[in-house]
Image (spheres, coloured by chain):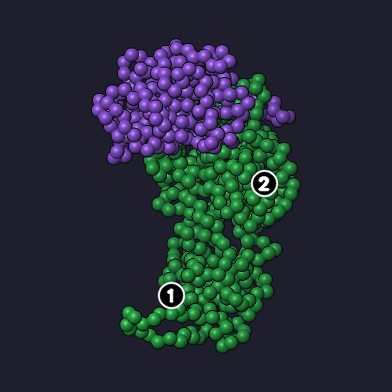
Amino acid sequence: MKKLIVLTLFFLGLGIQMNAQSAPGQMPPLTLEDYFSPSTAVPAGPDAKGFVQRWTLLEPIGKPGLNSNAAFNDSYLRKEFATVYFKDQNTMVPKDGQTVTLADKTKLKWHCLDSKKYNVKLYRFASGLGLRPTEGVFMAVTVINVDKDVTVRMAVGSNSGSIWYVNGEEAILLSNDRRMVVDDCVSPKLTLHKGKNVVRGTVINGPGMSDFCIRFYDENGNIFKDFTVTNQ
Amino acid sequence: MKKLYILAAAIILMALSAISANAQLKGNIFIHDPSTIAECDGKYYTFGTGSGGLISEDGYTWTGGGVRTGGGVAPDVIKIGDRYLVSYSAGFPGTEGKTRGNIITMWTKTLDPESPDFGYSDPMLVAWAEADEDCWAIDPAFLMGPDGKLWCSYGTYFGTIRICELDPKTGNRMPGDVATDVAIDCEATAMMYRNGWYYLLATHGTCCDGVNSTYNIVVGRSRNPRGPYYDNVGRDMMEGGGRMVLSAGNRVTGPGHFGHFVVDEGVERMSCHYEADMDLSGRSVLAINALQWRDDWPFVADQFKPGSFEIESVRRGYALEIAVDFVRMAGRSTRGFGSVNDPTFAIENQQLVDVIADWPKGEIGVRANDYMFRPHQRWTITPVEDAGGYLGFPYYKIEIEGTHRALAATEAEELITVPAFTGADEQLWRIEQLIDGTYRIMPKSVPGHDEPLALICTGDSTVALGKYDFNSDNSKWNFRDR
């Protein structure tokens, strides 16, 4: 327990008594390391609840002026997600530190990271890198390795709108001003083929926090965890 | 999603008055982020974002005039002993702008601004979150647990909802207490306790977007006030879980800021605001609904809608009727026999005109009997304009369908019908949905009686007035249209 601190300050003409375990302003800033660790060459498994924690994340593509998510209907998002910002956007399986160049010559870097939580806190990914965490588009890629063909459904929650592809095929769109809820939207049945399967997603958000979480369910509705995750 | 507080708008809206058919309440019901309704010296109070609040003498008709100092947003209030602890969230410049939100509490002996005892104590800063923290400390809400512990939940979409413990004697933070993260991606929380369960009510969806606001109220429950709180599919509210309690409908959108009020055993209310009442220019309004429980989960059923019904006793399933002759309908009893090729035809319902001429012209007694959807068993229930009401609802008159013959209470604790509704208190009825979905029916007053009495079954076929008992089916009724 931290020391009890009692402060008396003057607020709007009233004396305000403060009483808690630490005073405001004493918490150290949060860092990227509070939420992520660098990915390693050792394949990762899903966590105990099946969530995929290893991702290669692109520094956010800024969308200045996107100060509301009110417009995020299906049509808006499909148009937005169809936007090509850089070469090989929909096919590349990026390596750590690899950069892409936007039309305005802005260079953005990919980062291979393991989330320390079940979800991937995109806001903290950006803020941890000193980048603007709001009003932007995030892109994420990972590789799911299975030792035999398996039929699954992919369950996604995202804040806010997002679209997800498995091996180049659209799996699911999450539309509207959406909050991240585990198992919020679930894809139709799809096949994870023996070997490598590339999962690719784009998340868009205006103000506030942004994150996503993904796991798989097998044909019997049970959480599927018989896979490993790599960046390549 | 991200909350935008429009303080000035909320204050201005409180100056006006209107009635909404959907929200049901009357008077000045314009408010945003209302606190849990509190009762003080026979009046009801709720405070909203800004500095004011609403007051009601009967819980149905509301006016402005509530006073809360400190400004800020989304207050709450709880009565502890003979005092009221009020909380709100506001900026706090003492930390050079680094703190994103602060939870502040203060005491007052009364909520009545006209009382000489009225006045708030110095505010106490009981919880806060840093500018970069995964929490935005706003929207406080209190719960007094069954063990006398005082809990406060707070937070919004930016990060987590937290629960901390306060000292019920001082209203300040319990020394050494460390707040617990209990939910994500929601705001405007509240807590309840019932049957060994702690409930965390949370507002999901988009705030402050008028008729497009998708605000909705969900719930999770836990055996521990600090969670984890799980929803009906076993999903932790830290994973975004929550079971729906109330969403948009009936021309009102965006319910948020749940508040719990127990009227009586088995009679509970939930208050909230609707982001937009489409009958009131899409403005944010106070609403009060009956709260129900099923399998230890709370939910809000559709509001009672006036109309014509059978009034069915839960005791036996018999229908309330006036004591007149049962008039047989024409038609032979075939018992289903006959040729399959015999033509069939519809038989008309017995009509009021077929029987009313033989009814007594004066008072007629009331009883219960087999429901045969006959005219003497059909009741029309209508809210009475300008008759006031009770917490959340207006008084109703109960008349035989197609007539003005009205149900009335008598000094002898019996029930009669009078030839025409006069507006007398004994002809005004409060109809309250109970937590199990049935209803209690009570006259506004009974001549010669001070204590409240309800419509009860003293036998399967006999009805009278008596003391309401939630644990007895004698006190419960259903309204059915069949």
- Is B10 left or right of B179, judged from the image as shown? right
Instruction: State whether residue B14 is above or below residue B350.
Output: above
Q: Residue furthest left?
A: A148
Label 2: which secondary element: strand
Q: Please state the chain letter of the residue tagged with numbered disc 1 in the rendered image.
A: B
- Is B75 left or right of A51, judged from the image as shown? right
Amino acid of disc 1: Asp
Determine if residue B384 is in view: yes
Say which residue appears at 64% left-offset and 50% top-offset: B278
Dot in front, 1 or 2: 2
Label 1: which secondary element: loop
Could you tell which of marks 1 and 2 lies nearer the N-terminus? 2
Label placed on residue B283: 2
- Is B22 left or right of B337, judged from the image as shown? right
Q: Please state the chain letter of the residue tagged with numbered disc 2 in the rendered image.
A: B
Where does the C terminus of chain A fall, quadrant-wise?
Answer: top left
Pick the front one: B108 or B38: B38
Instruction: State whether residue B435 is above or below residue A152.
Output: below
Determine if residue A159 is in view: no
**Badge 2: few (under 14), some or many (20 or more) residues near its Cα, within 10 Å?**
many
Number of callouts: 2
Q: Position of residue B114 (x, y in %)?
A: 74, 48
Amino acid of disc 2: Arg
Query: On the image, numbered disc 1 is attached to which residue?
Result: B460
Pick the front one: B415 or B246: B246
Say which residue appears at 58% left-offset and 35% top-offset: A71
Q: Position of residue B322 (x, y in %)?
A: 53, 79
Please name the color used to draw chain A: purple
Residue A228, located in which quarter of the rendered image?
top left
Please name the color used to draw chain B: green
Whole-angstrom CA distance, mark 1 to mark 2, is 48 Å
